[in-house]
Image (cartoon, helix red, strand yellow):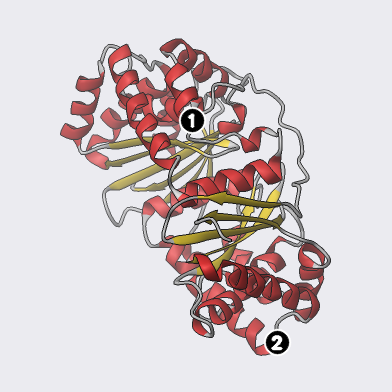
Amino acid sequence: MAQAVEIQEVTSPGGIKAWLVEDHTVPLVALNFSFEGGSAQDPAGKEGLTRLLAATLDEGAGDLDSETFQARLEDLAVSISFSTGKDRFYGSLRTLTPTLQEASDLLALAVNQPRFDDTPVERMKAQLVTRARRNESDPDAIAGRSLANAMFGEHPYARPTLGTVGSLEQLTPADLENHQERLLARDGLTIGVVGAIDAETLAAILDKVFANLPERADLVPVAELAPSFGNTVSDDLAVPQTTILLGLPGLKRNDPDYQAAYVMNHILGGGTFTSWMYQEVREKRGLSYSTGTSLSPYAHTGLLIASAATKADRAGETVEVMLNQLQRMAEDGPREEELRAAKQYLTGSYALRFDSSGKIARQLVALQNADLGIDYFDRRNSEIEAITLADIQRVAKRLLAEKNPTIVTVGPKQG
């Protein structure tokens, strides 16, 4: 199915570029976009500012207050949403074609003329503060924060994307206005569009929504980061289970070894019932209901994270089993039949990323952000097929050999 996706590059009269997959089978348009600059741009002490910006951009814009703006979206059955990662700020529009022009008018207002009125800003702040307060006692959230602090140190990546109760309560509409003016600009903009829309119609909408933004964002440079590993952090928490995270340096998405690492991660703990972590931790020993590994490629570093949750009195045993699997991959690597099965799964399941317009639009933005090229859909499976045992062994030694992960446990106090 991926081979059937034909991507056009569209450039508007105002110079706004987008990747378009034209598909008139249903009267729907999905538009995704991103700006360079995510939560890593939050100033120290204002953690959560970018997250709050994402929550308030559609809470009133232009001459429409929050209630009126939201009512227009509901009346038109239009969805506009915003979110943030550490490196980029994301937005999306979903609309039927009969309401495309009105929907794009509303998106243009949200992006260019957000109001940040006191009442909706305080309402959205209250929602985020509630989540932040809940995270203070959530073992998964605590483990994530501890891992980020231990591996990222003073780097902006250590700042919590959601913010903290204290930092969120200090944020003001003026902070949001200044931050929106810094982040939303044309130079770091990437756009993916899928649906019943031709290039000419799209070009006009691109200019309406994005052409009046500032040419360049005002971003604080983010330094390259070599994550710290070999640390051990234990957080005491009175909960039934102990949450475990093991963190090791990973790869950026543009690293030449990334595809080999992707296949290696699938065999090691990438989410199927046949992975080493699943077999050794859950199936053979019944230590954890779920366990796995994942790659987290950021713009300025990468991580490989293994996770599990288990009974407190078996946490030490679980960590030992997980470490053994990392060492096994570094020293022995997978067998030929395991590599063959992994490649078959990863190439066969790729089509699932293309079963909706929204998923394809997100993929178009992700490809541009990772600078993977407009032909990536066509060559991705052949790149996976080309991975050899020697490739897996090379990247396993690079990422895992003679490296002690940072180990975080959150659970009942032991001993």
Give me the C-alpha separation between circle 1 and circle 2: 46 Å
Residue 197 appears anywhere in the view: no
In the picture of the structure, the residue carrying the numbered disc 1 is 164
Location of residue 139 in the rendering, given as x and y in whole percent from the top left corner = 47, 51
Identify which residue, 357 or 233, lies in the foreground. Answer: 233
Q: Nearer the viewer, residue 174 or 17?
A: 174
**In terms of depth relative to the viewer, which is nearer, 247 or 304?**
247
244 lies left or right of 31: right
Which residue sits at x=81%, y=64%?
398
Q: Does residue 143 appear left or right of residue 224 in this picture?
A: left
Which numbered mark, 1 or 2, is in the foreground of this view?
1
Vertically, is 281 above or below 78?
A: below
Determine whether 197 is above or below 42 in the image.
below
Whether residue 325 is visible to the viewer of this picture, yes or no, is yes
Identity of the residue drawn at 66% across and 72% down: 320
Give the structural element (helix, strand or loop) at label 1.
loop
Residue 350 position, x and y percent, is 50, 68
Pick the quarter of the image with the C terminus. bottom right
Residue found at the far left of this picture: 75
Q: Residue furthest bottom?
A: 337
- Does 93 appear above or below 5? above
Disc 2 marks which residue? 335
315 or 69: which is nearer to us?
A: 315
How many residues crowd mark 2 within 10 Å: few (<14), some (14–19), many (20+)?
A: few
x 67%, y 69%: residue: 383
Identify the mark nearer the N-term, 1 or 2.
1
In the picture provided, is 222 more to the left or to the right than 74? right
